[in-house]
Image (cartoon, coloured by chain):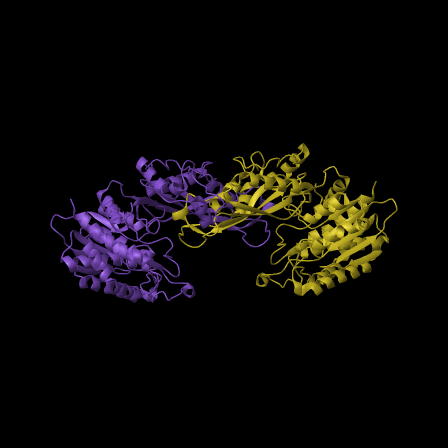
Chain colours: A purple, B yellow
Amino acid sequence: MDALFKVVDDNLDRILEELKTFLRLESISADPARKQATADTAGWLAEHLKHIGMAHVEVFPTEGHPLVFAHHPGPADAPTVLIYGHYDVQPVDPLELWTTPPFEPTIRDGKIYARGTTDDKGQLFAHVKALETLLREKGELPVSVKLIFEGEEEIGSGALGKWLPDHKDLLTCDLVVVSDSSMIAKGQPSIQYGLRGLVYFQVEVEGPSGDLHSGSFGGAVANPINVLADILASMKDENNKVTLPGFYDDVLPLTDEELANYDKLPYDEAEFLQATGAEATFGEAGFTSLQRMSARPTLDANGIWGGFQGEGAKTVLPAKAGLKVSMRLVPNQDPHKIADAFRAHIAKVAPPAARVKVIEFHGGLPFICPLDEPALQKAAAALKTVYGKDCLFSREGGSIPIVADINAALHQPVVLMGFGLNSENAHAPNEHFDLENFVGAIKTSLTYLHLLAEK
Amino acid sequence: MDALFKVVDDNLDRILEELKTFLRLESISADPARKQATADTAGWLAEHLKHIGMAHVEVFPTEGHPLVFAHHPGPADAPTVLIYGHYDVQPVDPLELWTTPPFEPTIRDGKIYARGTTDDKGQLFAHVKALETLLREKGELPVSVKLIFEGEEEIGSGALGKWLPDHKDLLTCDLVVVSDSSMIAKGQPSIQYGLRGLVYFQVEVEGPSGDLHSGSFGGAVANPINVLADILASMKDENNKVTLPGFYDDVLPLTDEELANYDKLPYDEAEFLQATGAEATFGEAGFTSLQRMSARPTLDANGIWGGFQGEGAKTVLPAKAGLKVSMRLVPNQDPHKIADAFRAHIAKVAPPAARVKVIEFHGGLPFICPLDEPALQKAAAALKTVYGKDCLFSREGGSIPIVADINAALHQPVVLMGFGLNSENAHAPNEHFDLENFVGAIKTSLTYLHLLAEK
């Protein structure tokens, strides 16, 4: 591998110039005014994939932004790896907080600054440059490689989600690699082998048909805010366990191996409290904060409203109140089953004197890749080769619905190999990507493709 | 009395013209642009009181709107009655919903339309016209009469509340009469012998110092909305009883006589549900709706807010949430004691992981006049004389803090003898006052003053 690593190092200036070209393309998927720019980005990426020698490259138009697909066959008996990434980026507001403009890539202090550097153009491009290095130096790849790069990750992956079920054959593979997340700390390689799922509801309670005087009517009419508070409070017990019937039935308990892994993860309580501004940690009895944030399901209100929100006192008995509440789910909870339990619980506890409406928003499946999965172990080995340190295994508390969807559609393991850092302002001004990690990502990808070829 | 009643009837045209003059004065206490108009109204009223022959009339300037005081001594051994009223009126918006302009009094279908007709200029003026009739026809009053008319009832009675403690001697009396409320139904005389008090709080909960991602942090940090819902829900039990320690300790239970009175009050459940738009009545176990709305204390949220209130789903773990919550109190609950219990309860149930701030707004004392109070019984007799029907006794669910304050300051019974109707749009466009009740009020006042003179 050292010869290939040297090629990467020797070509770094050119590679960075190419990355800058990619970063200059203003592929903000949420911005209708950038629809053409986003399509142009897909076009540039497809051309670049042809340019590095991928055998088959295709752009799939969609109702939204295009999908870029590519394929290069490896040896007949080698596995096929599907690499996922996204070429679209977040909006750039507030523009005035950027030290250098978001679409004028600039290198400072060993980091490259621009919108999309760490999320996800830079990480995606590292794989492309690994493939280029192999195709140029060896004329072939050690495994078959398919690429699927979407342009709507930042707006919900709608087009890919729609396209996926009809193109499973095209994407047939033995494993999926996603580099769209973060390492646990700089210099410390890590793999996120689990993601939480999500169910999200809006609950609306109506009492009287209009606001009433709380003096004249208070006591004889159901108060929507009180009813809503009762409903929400009834969903957790004094140990901060969720009380929905069957809620924990399908939760995969942490194995001894996972518990040992959690113990290895860096966590400092004082630092956590400092970062969040919380007075103390708080959560489900019997679990650590790291476990609560990633391996345990939660129920959190996301918003609430009703009645008088202004200054001072108004003695109103409000006509209605509303709540947004969501649950993060863990493997193997089923969002549909949990949603049913949620609705059934509300139907049971809501008083007949109030009208309660439950609206469900789009959620997502939880995801897990078994720790003994060879593709995961090889990824860890590749990271160790490049970073010189044992890889840590963590679960991510957030949800990446498209990962769970790909996993569910293709029935193959997904390896989340993130090279970003949490400090890199992924969705904020001055987004950047550490160049050591950019190079590390190229070298890890090179190494990984070779390890995957090994029987 | 018939001769006096005939004088009233014979002079009605003139009396109505005078009332119209009073109603044309734009005494909107809340409107800084009407400060002079409000002062002019006080001046006009004082002049009118001199004109009808009140022995002593005085206008007390205040930091806000003036107070109008008058006194006319009766026979040496007669009691002194203090009549309270207010000459200020509510704002008139939305102006376009008035059939005739709010300050152009108009008579239609036996009702007089203008801002202030029923609340409270018309009711106040009925007493003035009773006094005028007596002074003109008899040259004297059967009892000593003091009048106190304020100009800030619609904005919280601040000036009178401040002035009262220093002028107790001036107001010394044997009973207080207030005509600033409603009869229970047209043609059915009634007296409100109780009012609820009020304590009003804002509760603010802070968790993290800024909004957090509910995926990355959910489960390990106290969620201010969940905490707030827990606090609110913990304040009532499954029987809709308030759980604050000692909350019911001082509540005067309804006597058998009161229970019998409640049974006589008109109440139709279907009509109540129709009027409120509620699906069903709802409240403290063991009490009827009428009792719950007037003789029982309550705890109602008046407003709540926190997190994301927009369209769709946002997976935020909010930094803070707020609640407005108030309790209606009944005799003999002590607002200070209840406020202390409220704060102590929150201190006990709020988790240390959240910062909770409790802000108390201005409240008020509950009020009750004993049913066997002679001044009350004579008021009932006067109403029966004029309306030909037994008077009903009810308690009002709302709070009129100044009534409780006067009661507490003067240590004399207060008789709430209301001649308005709930349908008269007191705080809304097209406010009006039924002329039969205006005349009935004059005649009841005449009768009452005579009955009070009887030993």
Residue sitting farthest toward the left: A76
Query: Residue B124 at x, y = what percent?
Result: 73, 54
Identified at 22% across, 43% down, the residue is A374
Query: Residue A130 at x, y = what percent?
Result: 21, 57
| Lateral position of residue A82 relative to residue A316, left or right | left
| Lateral position of residue A221 relative to residue B154, left or right | left
Identified at 61% across, 51% down, the residue is B423
Whether residue B279 can be seen here: no
Quarter-wise, where is residue A69 in the image? bottom left
Residue sitting farthest toward the right: B76
Quarter-wise, where is residue A90 in the image? bottom left
Q: Nearer the viewer, residue B144 or B210?
A: B210
| Lateral position of residue A173 relative to residue A282, left or right | left
Task: Work out which quarter of the rendered image holds the C terminus of chain B and state it.
Answer: top right
Query: Residue A179 at x, y = what percent?
Result: 28, 53
| Lateral position of residue B217 relative to residue B455, left or right | left
Q: Nearer the viewer, residue A139 or A340?
A: A139
Q: Is residue A37 above or below residue B425?
A: below
Whether residue A37 can be seen here: yes
Q: Nearer the viewer, residue A309 or A242?
A: A242
Query: Residue A368 at x, y = what percent?
Result: 29, 43
